[in-house]
Amino acid sequence: MKILVTGGTGFIGSHTSIELVNDGHNVVIVDNLCNSNIDTLDRIRKITGIKVKFYDVDLTNYKDLESVFIENKFDAVIHLAGVKAVNESVQRPLKYFMNNLNGTVNLLTIMEKYSVKRLVFSSSATVYGKMNDLPLKEDSTLDVTNPYGRTKLMIEEMLEDIFNSSPNWGIASLRYFNPIGAHSSGLNGEIPRGIPNNIMPYITQVAVGKLDMLSVYGNDYPTHDGSGIRDYIHVEDLAKGHILALEKVLKNNLYEVYNLGTGKGYSVFELISMFEKTTGIEIPYKIVDRRDGDVAACYADSTKAFKDLGWKAEKNLRDMCIDAWKWQNNIG
């Protein structure tokens, strides 16, 4: 199958592309490289032995995106492109509406025009509200707290509307929890630009001395140790979830939403402690103010993904720390 991966040089996109290639698919990547690096293509080739086709295209540019569909006959799309920092979205909401919403409308319009009606969408656990009981289920209350999450929820609603209007589509929205770790080979992982928005590369950069100290955003949440609790999932487990969701939509006309998480919540301090135990390196930290839009605790019930897709997370928090540290050591 020929699969278009938007955002395919990003952290999740590159690992998903690796799994797709290893599964025998012909992968084409579209990415504008706004939050990734062209060198990722070499890393995908090193791991898989395959050079994937790449287009430096921004989804908000309709003409350039359409040219990709003119040149290729796709069987399905995995849509991961978009800007994704919660705090930045609060400060710059228009950037998020422009990139995430307009880019997706362009993509869907072109997919419909060229009769490509199989889609796996990268959604997020940020679509859930603050007042839900934990663990979160797909039918939990949706009530976003930031513009980034709002774009994800709006796109989910678009996709459901499209399916309801034309039920010959096969669409799966995957609500990610908190992907961390790196490829187990040590050859691919997250390379943030500037100060990392995500916690694991922040920790690993402190561990190698690139950054002096980790900032912990709040220690006064209503949790057992005051820090935020999240469902950390290994990026390879997450990537494999895309393969199983793709198999589902290729065979069925449907619109379904799936949580992808481990079902276990760990606090920031517990993550730091596990990294220290795993590597033997102490991580100095400072407490700073909470970030706008963050919630106290968030972890998944992924029973539906197991029942429908046969997916479950296989790797634990220690595995995530080991692989992230291996990757950081490889890039220095």
Image (spheres, rainbow, N blue to C red):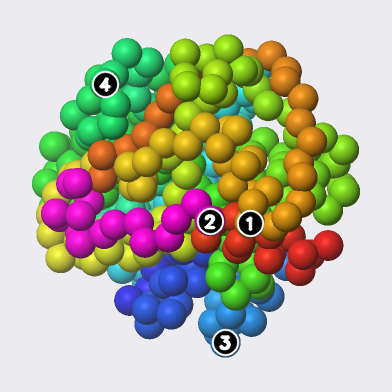
Residue 318's disc is: 2
Residue assigned mark 4: 133
* Left or right position of 137 against 240: left
Q: Is residue 314 magenta?
A: yes
Q: Nearer the viewer, residue 321 or 252?
A: 321
Q: State whether residue 232 is above or below residue 223.
A: below
Quadrant containing the C terminus is bottom right
Camera-nearest label, 2 or 4? 2
Residue 236 visible from this viewpoint: yes
**Mark 3 touches mark 4? (CB < 8 Å):** no
Quadrant containing the N terminus is bottom left
Residue assigned mark 3: 49
Residue in view at x 36 percent, y 61 percent: 314
Q: For the residue carrying disc 4, how many other residues have a C-alpha within 10 Å: few (<14), some (14-19), or many (20+)?
A: few
Mark closest to the chain's N terminus, 1 or 3: 3
Q: Amino acid at mark 1?
A: Thr
Provide residue 312's location: percent of width, then percent of height. 29, 57
Q: Which residues are magenta?
A: 303-318
Q: Amino acid at mark 4?
A: Asp
Provide residue 259's location: percent of width, then percent of height. 30, 42
Residue assigned mark 1: 278
Mark closest to the chain's N terminus, 2 or 3: 3
Q: Secondary structure at mark 1?
A: helix
Camera-nearest label, 3 or 4? 4
Mark closest to the chain's N terminus, 3 or 4: 3
Q: State whether residue 97 is above or below residue 299.
A: above
